[in-house]
Image (tube, rainbow, N blue to C red):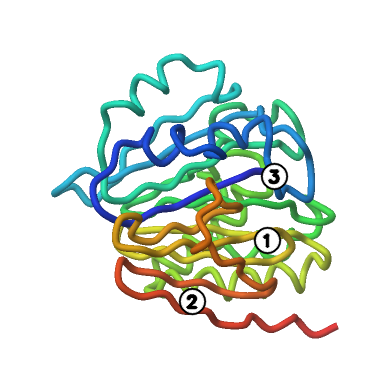
Amino acid sequence: MCRHLARLGPPAALGEVLVAPAHALYRQSWEPRRQRHGTVNADGFGVGWYAEGDPAPARYRRAGPIWADLGFTDLARVVRTTALLAAVRDATEPGADGEAAAAPFASGPWLFSHNGAVKGWPGSLAALAAGLPGEELLSLAARTDSALVWALILHRLRRGDSIGEALADTVTEAAAAAPASRLNLLLTDGGTIAATAWGDTLWTLTGPDDGVVVASEPYDDDPRWREIPDRTLVVATRTDLSLTPLKEPPA
């Protein structure tokens, strides 16, 4: 349960994307317009962005609500980037792990966020967790469903899967193990965005000034926003966007 957004495009200040629009992610922390589960996203927030010439993203995360962090608005005013991923959090279990549980999670060039909840957590994914190497389980970023989903994706990325393949296969596997889960996932490496619509809203915006934006909901009323059908994988670059239906796991 959260709202998240990723963008690739011309250089822009973080605040131009996350704070300034009429219904920006900043405002969605207390007044989302299309959130189906939960009403306030005040259990943490984070933003990750890429600096020119450095493949590893920087992150700024906090355990509290985004509107209470005066340092963030100052940071967002001056930091400019061509690629970012940000999220505001409504925790499944409030208070669990604090800042460590706030998206985006990160490793190497990747940033990741999960909007949703794993049904029957933690037992429902026990078999999948057991398939991970011990060192990967011991290095989980937090004791949350999102952190384990990230570990499953990261395992695939490290063995060479594309970001689209890693998301699609993890969603299918997790949905089979935990039916009725909500698995809207968002992943970027700074050059490509991959996302899944699985149980909650997902929208895209493309244009010369915006580049490509993939978000839980529109941050303004621009008519170019396009709603993504449920059970869909989105893969986007600055110049291309593709949609692929995701198969339901066998009953």
Say whether residue 60 is left or right of residue 35. left
Mark 1: amino acid = Leu
Report the Cα–Cα distance between label 3 and label 2: 30 Å
User: Callout 3: few (<14), some (14-19), or many (20+) C-alpha neighbours within 10 Å?
Assistant: few
Residue at left offset 66%, top offset 73%: 229
The residue that disc 2 covers is: 165
Residue at left offset 33%, top offset 60%: 211
Mark 3: amino acid = Arg
| Label of residue 183 in the image | 1
Question: Looking at the picture, does residue 1 appear above or below residue 229?
Answer: above
Question: Which of the two residues, 111 or 192, is positioned nearer the viewer here?
Answer: 192
Question: Looking at the picture, does residue 112 appear above or below residue 156?
Answer: above
User: Which residue is the extreme one toward the left?
Assistant: 53
The residue that disc 3 covers is: 33
Secondary structure under the numbered disc 3 in the rendered image: loop
Image quadrant containing the N terminus? top right
